Image: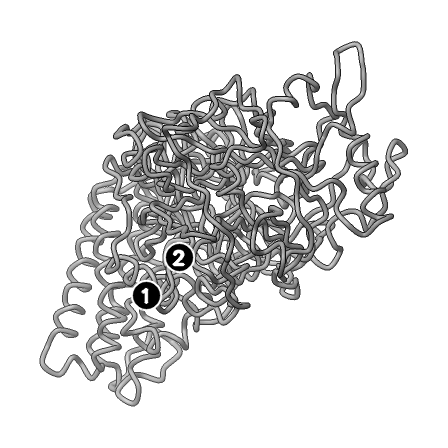
Amino acid sequence: MTASDGEETDTLDDDERRRMLRYAAVTTLAGSGVLGAWYVSQPGETDGTGEETPLDPDEETPPDTDDDVAAPDGVPAVVERFAPDLYFGALEKWFPTDPRPYVEETDEGSVVDGFVALDEYAAAFRETGSPPAPTVFYHVVEAADGIDAVQYWLYSAFDQFTVNFHWHDWELLQVFVDRETGEPVLLSASAHSRASPNNEFLDPSISDGSRPGILAEVGSHSSASEVNGMVPSFERLPIDDRLSDVTNGGIDVSASLRAPFAYGLPRDEGARLPFVLPELDGYPLFEHPSLSIERDDLIDERVTVGSWSGLPAPPTNLPLRESGLVLAHPDSAAADGEADATYALEPIAPLRDSIDGFVGPQLSFEFAIPGVVEDAVASHITSVGIPWEQERFTDPLADVTDPAHRREIDGAEPSGLRNRLVGRVRQLRAGADGALDGVSEAVQDAVAGVAGVSFYAPPVELAVRLASETPTATVTRNGVFGYLHVEPGPHLLVVNGPGVEPLAARFSHEGGLVRAGDDGDLTVVANEDAGWIRGDARETNGVVRVRVIEDYAGVVYDGEAVETDRFAVAVHREGRYTVEVTDRDGRRGAYRVTPASFGDGGEVLFDRIRAGKLSLTTTLRDELDEVYTLAESLAGSGGTQTTDRDETRETETPVLDRLRRATRTAAGAVTTVENGDREAADEQLRSVVSSLEEVRESLASERQSGYGDSAVAAIDPKVRAGIERATHAIDAKI
């Protein structure tokens, strides 16, 4: 994990937006051929022609939290003016409704039971083909001096999402309004969870007759404001002359990617997101004896994955999001055109008087965590809870998650907005036409013949679970994820998804911005391609940190050991890796893993991990052997054709000759270390360094020993890495 004390998020200017668009288009999904970079469809435009009714501060004061009932002559004008148009996906099952029909009287008071709400809502929807009682509840509260928050609360009977499902789902849109001018200052649409950044838009242009649009995520109902007229799609970044749907500031997710710190809509950015079927008491919900719902009452099976671990690879045929039902306020222009139905706009205060609680048994979600011996299983659900029991109900600014937006409202900048975790997940696959971080772009063609694996964008979005005292799950958006309000201290981060082996890493968050994995990059591999590298140092001097580097793809894992003194990392079996470890005393060690290492079992187990001179010297020998193979493959007609490196041919280049000498000397040093002769081993290792320096001199000569520029650029970094490894081995104890 990489931490940064300073944070670089702020409102984006035009130049920065253009830069981010280039980053997203060029680096986010390099070589994937699967997903368009931040791609979104553009189904068309819409605008409103309704009449604006501004709030007159001299005639009407927004109600406070205890008196937000409708005025005798109807809903407050400011509430009606900004009542949003609601856009849903074609696969949506649970639309905003009124929970009061599902209230039951119990010993605990008047409660909405999850079984009753789900059963009766589904039956009514099934019978009529229309959403039962579409309703949006409003609440108005002062947010800051001269700024009022108009809150629109939406209740759904159920939440079925990739990483979470629960009874009773409340979502929120906040419109912050300047009391003097009656104009909106900020739109804030609630994300998947309180740990995810909201989708926010500063200074929206909502002219006479128009109103905010809300794009709802299928199943989870998290939302984003629709402000750029490209309805009903979500745009994280500007397209042509169109604004994006968020003004959340940019953040460096990894060394090669900068993106807005916004949740977005994972199924609305050209990406595929698999859903899972919720279970209770070992039954799928549609087979549970206490429920009468049918399979068709849940999310469509075309986008549902039953077993993640049972798939050999991530699915590639899940349909993208399609436009679905549109709900509008009766006074909206959409009500006379594109809307399929209108909703009732009602104050939320009467619900507090008639409902004492929302209840239902906990639903679990299994999430594999890689271990040395077996997988552990964790279960969790996350629900934001009842509106009037939440902090943001009375303190609307508690839900503004972009620091620059918060400063615009009241000038404050709570520290929690700065405690963030970000990262990008990529998939390691066979082939060299993806991203090769381990070599420069200029030499990728030169090493294509020897590179076995490279990075690609996953064909589906993946699940990410952050476990501390309270586990929280989210999903990636084009491979990117972000967490907010991360508590200082130790955490376990796990990435999982259909058809991929789980990835886990421990880290400590000390505040500020932390980039997961290798400076923001994490790597997964398909089940069918996976080989496991496991290490056990409980009987030696322990292991506290692990770093796995593929020869050409680059770093595929970097983190603390998941278990005490043990680790387990899934890699692609076609790659060639160096596993670097650090023990409890800070000493380094290294091990080599090649395709042959996995054998028939698909697993490599280092059962007595040791840092120190022997592992470093052995790895140096094996790495130099790979450098020789690379140099030989790039030598062309000027290189040797021999297959026996113990024999020297007249055609062998100076580079190959010196690499052969360095490799043989390193092999001798391994034997010397095994015999316990440190002084002699160090002398041999210094000889290796000398030979490698001569290789560099040959490559830097005028004729470059017959190698072209791209070949030199490919070989020289590997030689420098060999010098560094030999130096560490010299410094290490036996």
Nearer to us in this view, 348 or 61: 61
From the viewer's perspective, is the residue at label 2 or at label 1 nearer?
2
Task: Please give the name of the residue rendered at 65% of the width and 22% of the height, measured from the top-left corner.
Answer: 350
Quarter of the image that includes the C terminus: top left
User: How far across and how far down the image is residue 688, in percent?
Assistant: 21, 59
Residue occupying image coordinates x 53% and y 28%? 139
Q: Is residue 601 visible?
A: no
Nearest to the observer: residue 429 or residue 94: 94
Q: Which mark is residue 66?
A: none
Left or right position of 401 against 285: left
Q: Is residue 84 visible?
A: yes
Instruction: Residue 386: give x, y in percent of width and height.
Output: 60, 25
**Up/down of 456 relative to 156, above or below:** below
Secondary structure state at the residue bearing disc 1: helix
* Residue 602: % across, % down: 60, 55
Mark 1 is on which residue type?
Arg
Q: In the depicted view, which residue is nearer to us: 642 or 311?
A: 311
| Residue at image point 52% right, 17% down | 66
Where's the N terminus, which quadrant? top left
Residue 206 x, y percent position in the rendering: 41, 50
User: 214 above or below 285?
Assistant: below
Furthest toward the bottom, the residue is 637
Q: Nearer the viewer, residue 191 or 344?
A: 344
Work out whether mark 2 precedes mark 1 in sequence or the reverse, and give the earlier one.
1
**Are circles 2 and 1 on residues that touch, CB within 8 Å?**
no
Specify the farthest residue to the left. 702
Q: Secondary structure at mark 2?
A: loop
Number of other residues with Cα within 10 Å of mark 1, as a class: few under 14, some 14 to 19, many 20 or more: some
Marker disc for residue 22: 1
- Mark 2: amino acid: Ser
Q: Which residue is mark 2?
A: 244
Measured Cα–Cα span from mark 2 to mark 1: 14 Å
